[in-house]
């Protein structure tokens, strides 16, 4: 799977994603992460990519031309007639979640547009963007951190990226449940013991306990998710 990230700070993105599991996946050519500096595509001799907004208001706006030309160069290099799904990282988008990550992971290629300043000229967004996505109801200084969060969440769902695929199938948000509590050695730490059921060797009982814990934890911490789980289990619409 190929990730193409349009940004004003390519080093920030490369440094953040070229580590750990994603770095190993890239070395094995399961994924590729390519960054594109939008400033390289501006026609301004001073590499300027922003200007004042029509109608007034605070701050500057990223111009349409360099963004579009960067996008066009990415698409042209792929030599495909199919439209590449293009994600604009913005607080105004739909909130990112695990099901969305799974949907994006089914694509062969994704383009991310990282906004800055007061955003991006609406006209180019209308031309190139297929999905506007937010990672939460707060505002960052730019789209790079949010894009990196999404790339990480999506890439780990690409087959082969995780050595243990069971991890992706049992972690939080699978079936609308948070993950159950987990324990490792030693059996006693700070006078706290590992639950006896986990030492029993009875896998059926362990699975039942883990489901019970997941349901209880989700009900307590994320009642919105619990309600979705409850309705799904009861067959309600």
Image (spheres, rainbow, N blue to C red):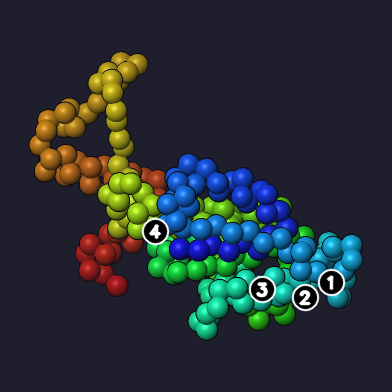
* Residues at marks 2 and 3 touching, judged by CB atoms closer than 8 Å: no
Which picture quadrant has residue 158? bottom left
For residue 235, say whether it is visible: yes
Residue 104 image point, x, y percent: 45, 66
Left or right of 177? Residue 147 is right
Residue under label 2, please give it.
65
Q: Residue at x 23, y 42 (%)?
A: 210
* Residues at marks 4 and 2 touching, judged by CB atoms closer than 8 Å: no
Residue under label 3, please give it.
73
Residue under label 4, please give it.
158
Q: Residue at x 81, y 65 (%)?
A: 49
* Residues at marks 1 and 4 touching, judged by CB atoms closer than 8 Å: no
Residue 58 image point, x, y percent: 85, 62
Q: Nearer the viewer, mark 2 or mark 3?
A: 3
- Helix, strand, or loop for circle 3? helix
Which picture quadrant has residue 155? bottom left
* Residues at marks 3 and 1 touching, judged by CB atoms closer than 8 Å: no
Q: Nearer the viewer, mark 1 or mark 2?
A: 1
The answer to which of marks 1 and 4 sits earlier in the sequence is: 1
Task: Report the Cα–Cα distance between label 1 and label 4.
Answer: 37 Å
């Amino acid at each position: 799977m190929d990730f193409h990230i349009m940004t004003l700070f390519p080093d920030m993105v490369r440094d953040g994603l070229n580590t750990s599991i994603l770095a190993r996946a890239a070395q094995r050519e399961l994924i590729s992460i390519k960054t594109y500096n939008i400033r390289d595509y501006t026609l301004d001799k001073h590499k300027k990519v922003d200007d004042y907004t029509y109608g007034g208001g605070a701050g500057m706006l990223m111009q349409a031309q360099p963004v579009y030309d960067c996008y066009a160069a990415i698409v042209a290099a792929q030599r495909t007639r199919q439209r590449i799904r293009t994600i604009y990282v913005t607080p105004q988008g739909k909130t990112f979640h695990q099901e969305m990550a799974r949907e994006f992971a089914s694509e062969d290629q994704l383009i991310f547009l990282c906004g800055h300043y007061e955003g991006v000229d609406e006209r180019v967004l209308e031309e190139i963007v297929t999905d506007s996505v937010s990672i939460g109801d707060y505002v960052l200084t730019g789209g790079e951190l949010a894009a990196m969060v999404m790339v990480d969440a999506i890439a780990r769902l690409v087959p082969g990226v995780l050595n243990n695929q069971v991890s992706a199938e049992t972690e939080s948000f699978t079936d609308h449940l948070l993950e159950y509590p987990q324990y490792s050695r030693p059996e006693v730490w700070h006078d706290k013991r590992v639950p006896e059921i986990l030492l029993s060797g009875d896998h059926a009982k362990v699975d039942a306990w883990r489901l019970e814990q997941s349901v209880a934890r989700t009900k307590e911490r994320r009642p919105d998710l619990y309600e979705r789980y409850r309705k799904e289990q009861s067959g309600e619409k």
